[in-house]
Image (cartoon, rainbow, N blue to C red):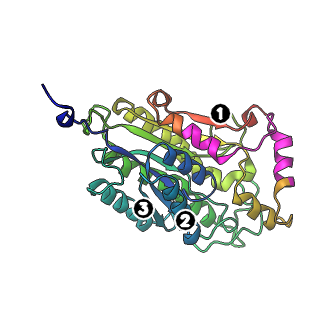
Amino acid sequence: MMSSTSSSFSPLPPRPIAIITGGTRGIGKGIATVLASEGYDLVLTYNSNEECATNFAKTLLKEHDDINVKCVGGDITLVDTRDEIFSTLDKMCSSSSSNSNTHQGRRLAALVHNAGQYVGITADNCAKLDAPTKSLAFGDGSLLDKDGRANLDTMDYYHKMYGEAFIDLCERTLVRMGSRDDDNGGGAGGGGTIIGISSPGVCAHYYNADWSYSMPGSGKSLMEYSMRIYAERVASRGINVNCIVPGVTKTDAWTRLSQKRGLGDDPTEMMKAVIERGMPMKKVVDPIDIGNLVKFLCTDSGKYMTGQVIPFDGGRHLR
């Protein structure tokens, strides 16, 4: 008869790791906060505000002493930045140290590509592009220089940030994520969740085309289209791939937009006008709410949803 002191011990499944680009502020911060509470180790990226990233990571570690949080700085359009993301991830996965001795290793379980900006307004960029002096859109001649040629520098940057970065992140993630049938210890398989954060008026049929969003929307179109291809090709591995379209979300980006438009430091009235005009629920989205949606998509039940552009917009897509 086996004594209680010599009973067998079964370790928990490998601790899940989530990569969240733009994960230290705004929507990404909300997602990171929720996943940290679910026991995920985190690799969070930031563009240039190292102090903000460091303070947020310290807050998470103080609130959850059994997780690991690593921050990676740099413009997400740069291959070097993405190299550093996966170098950091691989070190976390191979490390024998863990704040919790009940888990058998770690594995990449989620990728959320959230990093983004309004060029020259809400963040710096490695291309040194300033905010356009005029609205850039397809079909009205605004892209033409004095020589009659289309200047596609701003569009190219958005394509690199949303389209190319998403594809590179997905390709590198998929070789590390495995399959739900893999034996990763503790009886757990692989598989996982990939999510891109998109916007209204891109290419989902819910929304009418928005000419004022031509530049960033063209980059996010590549994200949304490739998402559907990835979803079909990796579904059998237990990996779901989706895009989320948030509604009006209270983040620092709105403050920067308000300042740029000469409306002061308080974006409340500008946000209220957008909500009144286009959101039946008349409610601002909290980044934590978006984090809870991401959490659901990472569950076994949520994984049955794949290949979707998911409006999380208070009814904006109905207008």
Q: Which residues are magenta?
A: 269-294
Q: Nearer the viewer, mark 2 or mark 3?
A: 2
**Mark 1 and mark 3 in contact (Cβ < 8 Å)?**
no
Q: Position of residue 64 (x, y in %)?
A: 48, 52
Kind of element beneath mark 3: helix
Can you say which quadrant of the picture contains the N terminus? Answer: top left
Say if the magenta span includes residue 276. yes
N-terminal of the two: label 2 or label 3?
Answer: 2
Vertically, is 117 above or below 292? below
Q: Residue at x 49, y 30 (%)?
A: 302
Total numbered circles: 3
Kind of element beneath mark 2: helix
The residue under label 1 is: 205
Distance Cα–Cα, label 2 vs label 3: 17 Å
Specify few, some or many for label 1: CA neighbours under 10 Å numbering under 14, 14-19, or 20 or more. Answer: few
Q: Position of residue 242 (x, y in %)?
A: 52, 38
State whether residue 126 appears in this view: no
In the image, farthest residue toward the bottom: 128
Is most of the magenta stretch helix, strand or loop? helix
Of the residues shown, which amino acid type is indicated by label 1? His
Vertically, is 90 above or below 194? below
Q: Position of residue 165 (x, y in %)?
A: 48, 56
Vertically, is 306 above or below 29? above
In the image, farthest residue toward the left: 1
Vertically, is 235 above or below 120? above
Q: Residue at x 82, y 38 (%)?
A: 282
Residue in the foreground of this view, choosing between 151 and 205: 205
